[in-house]
Image: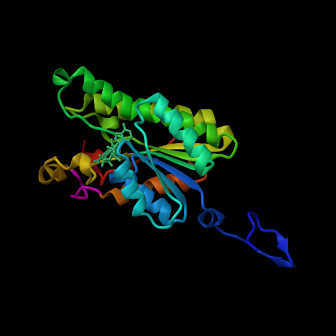
């Protein structure tokens, strides 16, 4: 019989080197229907975890769930910028799926444009989705994690660290996430909840589909855009790294070195 720590059973001492990999935990991925979030969902499912995929478009979340290995995955519709929707969604997750072990905040939007031309509505959309949305989902998930521990990874950006012309508000949301991540890490460490952040560079997803790739890769030392799976690997590492909290892991092909 496999046991959590290594107990004597019928005179046989069983040692489990990596119990975590054998247990099916619940991972909730906001923005799991596409791009980086979908790649994280696939990796979590491939490791035998149950995944709840959340996005505004339910059909897209359901299609993402249908592509995952294993069978105990759930798709939910929720706009992370809406407090009541987040509250109800996490209540539903707790009721139907159980305690959350992993939370990944990959829901995000971008609106490029000089500050002088940025509409108030777009500013609010960026702030409410990228920054407030992550705060709301972390708060909601903590209620589930407080008694059992857990791990959270938020998705920032290299532009949150270095800034970028045409991305004032977007980069502010991503810089804000770093402060939020570090503070929350301190707040919940005593409950065995870890909070970290990945800061991707240019990654090939819908969000970057309209960019001039050939031009932009000139500034990337590795000479290419990253793939969503390459960010997902870093996210999975942070979810599972037992002695890391409050950290920022940059996944950018060296872009920040040149910014
Ligand atoms: P995509 O546009 O490919 O996917 C975004 C995901 O977020 C979708 O699943 C989308 O689903 C969901 N989403 C957007 N708004 C909301 C909302 N209000 N509520 C719930 N879900 C929402 O983006 P990426 O995968 O590229 O980006 C993921 C994260 O990584 C973002 O935070 C982005 O800022 C960050 N990032 C991306 C980089 C890149 O180069 N791609 C670089 C640096 C950071 P739906 O539309 O159905 O709601």
Relative placement, left or right, of 239 versus 230 is: right
Q: Residue furthest bottom?
A: 11
Image quadrant containing the N terminus: bottom right
Image height of 115 relative to 31, above or below: above
Relative placement, left or right, of 172 versus 225 is: right
State the residue at coordinates (26%, 23%). 121
| Residue 221 part of the magenta-drawn span | yes
Instruction: Pinpoint residue 203: horizontal percent, then vertical percent.
Output: 28, 52
State the residue at coordinates (36%, 60%). 229
Q: Please tell me in which quadrant of the rendered image residue 2 appears.
A: bottom right
Instruction: Pinpoint residue 96: horizontal percent, then vertical percent.
Output: 59, 49
Q: Please tell me in which quadrant of the rendered image residue 224 appears.
A: bottom left
What secondary structure is the magenta-colored segment mainly? loop
Q: Is residue 143 visible?
A: yes
Image quadrant containing the C terminus: top left
Q: Residue furthest right?
A: 11
State the residue at coordinates (76%, 64%). 5
Question: What range is drawn magenta here?
Answer: 220-226
Relative placement, left or right, of 138 versus 36 is: right
Instruction: Pinpoint residue 217: horizontal percent, then vertical percent.
Output: 18, 53
Q: Please tell me in which quadrant of the rendered image residue 228 appears.
A: bottom left
Q: Quadrant of ligand 1?
A: top left
Image height of 180 relative to 251, above or below: above
Q: Nearer the viewer, residue 171 or 86?
A: 86
Q: Nearer the viewer, residue 116 or 85?
A: 85
Instruction: Pinpoint residue 205: horizontal percent, then vertical percent.
Output: 27, 52
Relative placement, left or right, of 216 versus 79 is: left
| Residue 203 part of the magenta-drawn span | no
- Count of numbered tags: 0
Image height of 85 relative to 71, above or below: above
């Amino acid at each position: 019989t496999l046991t959590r720590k290594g107990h004597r059973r019928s005179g046989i001492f069983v040692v489990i080197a990596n119990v975590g990999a054998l247990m099916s935990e619940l991972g909730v991925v906001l923005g799991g229907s596409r791009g980086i979030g979908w790649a994280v969902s696939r990796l979590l499912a491939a490791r035998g975890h149950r995944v709840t995929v959340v996005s505004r478009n339910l059909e897209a979340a359901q299609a993402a769930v249908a592509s995952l290995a294993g069978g105990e995955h759930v798709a939910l519709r929720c706009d992370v910028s809406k407090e009541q929707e987040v509250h109800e969604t996490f209540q539903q997750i707790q009721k139907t799926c159980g305690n959350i072990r992993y939370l990944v905040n990959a829901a995000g939007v971008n609106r490029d444009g000089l500050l002088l031309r940025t509409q108030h509505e777009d500013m609010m959309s960026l702030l409410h989705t990228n920054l407030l949305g992550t705060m709301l989902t972390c708060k909601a998930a903590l209620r589930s994690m407080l008694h059992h521990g857990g791990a959270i990874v938020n998705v920032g950006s290299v532009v949150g660290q270095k800034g970028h012309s045409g991305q004032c508000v977007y980069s502010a949301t991503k810089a804000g996430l770093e402060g939020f991540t570090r503070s929350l890490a301190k707040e919940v460490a005593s409950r065995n909840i870890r909070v970290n952040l990945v800061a991707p560079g240019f990654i090939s997803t819908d969000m970057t589909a309209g960019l001039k790739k050939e031009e932009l890769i000139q500034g990337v030392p590795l000479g290419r855009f990253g793939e969503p799976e390459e960010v997902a690997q870093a996210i999975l590492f942070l979810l599972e790294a037992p002695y890391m909290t409050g950290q920022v892991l940059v996944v950018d092909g060296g872009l920040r070195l040149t910014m």
